[in-house]
Amino acid sequence: MSSMPTPRPPARSSTVLPHGADAPEPAYFADPAIDRLMGVVMSLASEVWILNDRLSAMERVLADKGVVTDGDRSAWAADPKVQRELDAERDAFVRGLMDHLLGVQVSRGVPHG
Amino acid sequence: MVEITSATVASRPTAARTSDTPTVTPGDLPAGPALAPRPADRPDRRFEAHQRFVLATKVHWSTRLYPALKAVTRARLEAARGRGELTAQDPQAVQRLLAPDPLMPFYAWLERHLQQMKYAGRDGLVRYHDGNRLLLEAWLAQADALSSLELDPGFQPPPYYEAFDVHQHPGGLLGDTLAGIVYEHGARSTTPLLQRHQDLHHRLTQAVRDRTTPGRLLDLGCGFGKSTEPFAQADPDLPITAVDLSPPCLRLAALNAHARGHTHMRFLQRDAAATGFADAAFDTVTSTMLLHELPPSHLRRVVAETHRLLAPGGWVVHLDFLVLSGDAFDRFIHHGHGRRNNEPFMQALDGLDLAALHREAGFREVDVVSFEEAPGTLGPDHTAWRFPWALVAARK
């Protein structure tokens, strides 16, 4: 179907200019790994907003069509069994996210020597 | 409605490029053929949400991070003075002061990478328009039938223009036929706080008209015509010539002008340093955000060229970026912006004595002044980041 833009030919100028075709991406943090991590974080942030936006649109369309009203959502209270399931999902979500801070190894490393 | 087929694009003999002013003057241009309308933007909710997220983050950077960084700098400066440390008042001193501060790398990273998030990646401008490539290329190809457009297939752009991707536009403004479309879309949010970016260009038009009657107007580095358009709106009979290096931008400019019914505008692929027009061919020469894109040696040639092109008494008016306050923090931020956003000549421009340059070129009455791009932006209550807009006006 549609094609991506043709890759640019290498720079012909002999003038040394920053950020030219061969220039490495600059690092702003003392540890350049953080620069890359910021990329992951910001990409993730955008995806979170995109999801939020889609969900909001969905909720409003459902409300407009009378399928699910805002009141329905607010009034919905999980029965105790469902609430316990939700609580467990929430705790798993938090654990999966925050356990990384403990730096626990998930498999045995190869011993030295 | 005209369907776009190969027959729609009338064949047109390639005009031999001469070094003289083209014989057709803008007032004589025919209305032109009926052209198919521009393809509509594709609806894409993901794309819109991502672009709004990037813009919102840029606004946060402008209104929250930047003022915080400025406050931090002030505090560190005062602390350094309090300790009796001699602190030079230059951008390098500011950089040293801020080096240990955690805010600085985030400020810098975001300035560079928000631009990348805007243009590149799954929800970037390049991919978005690439998804409509066939229709857009067919629409753009109609420009070659317009007598208001003159492109030179043998044109050699100056080497600096192809050496890097200006303002991080992936692939630059020469290669991809859609580069002008992408650039135009991106320009909607270059200055994140301006509700209507268009106002900026109208204000330049007003600044020109405050000084002179435009007469025969030349706009240098017109891009896709955003800076040129307000002149035609103010006076539809004004003969306007506009030049740029980028055929993708020029095609878009010509099509936009045609769609708006302008019959007195022409767009040519010319180097601002050597336009090929006759001596004294224009009464007014303008440029917007061109100077900072030029290597200083090229800029000096552009200044000389503007003098040659003007009739006696004519004005040249450039709108660009200069830190006229000389403030160390402002220079640090602005020069850093140039480095971070692939604008390698921005710092050099700030170091030039443009008034002296113009006087040496033979201009009298040279003004270099701050420019208020929107109400209140020069006032003390404006705390957000902004470009250091400046006007350079000189009379022959």
Image (cartoon, rainbow, N blue to C red):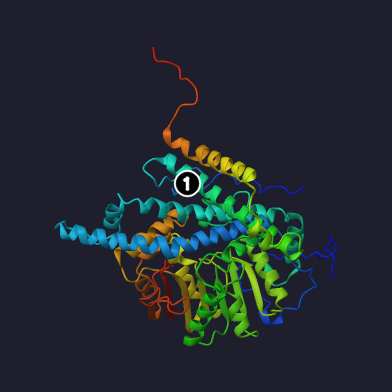
Crowding near the residue tagged with mark 1, few <14, some 14–19, many ≥20 C-alpha atoms within 10 Å? some
Q: Amino acid at mark 1?
A: Met
Which of these two is toward me, B66 or B390?
B66
- Measured as percent of width and height from the top left, residue B223 is found at 59, 66
Tell me if residue B155 can be seen: no
* Residue wearing tag 1: A38
Horizontal relation, residue B368 to residue B196: left or right: left
* A66 w.r.t. B307: above or below: above
Residue drawn at point x = 38 percent, y = 59 percent = B335
Which of these two is toward me, B304 or B370?
B370
- Determine the chain carrying the residue at label 1: A
Q: Residue furthest left?
A: B84
> The N terminus of chain B appears in which quarter of the rendering?
bottom right
Horizontal relation, residue B190 to residue B123: left or right: left
| Quarter of the view holding residue A50 | bottom right
Say which element carries label 1: helix
- Measured as percent of width and height from the top left, residue B226 is found at 59, 71
| Quarter of the view holding residue B246 | bottom right
Horizontal relation, residue A20 to residue B349: left or right: right
> The C terminus of chain B appears in which quarter of the rendering?
bottom left
Tell me if residue A49 can be seen: yes
- Measured as percent of width and height from the top left, residue A74 is found at 63, 59
Total marks drawn? 1
* A56 w.r.t. B221: above or below: above
Which of these two is toward me, B384 or B128?
B384
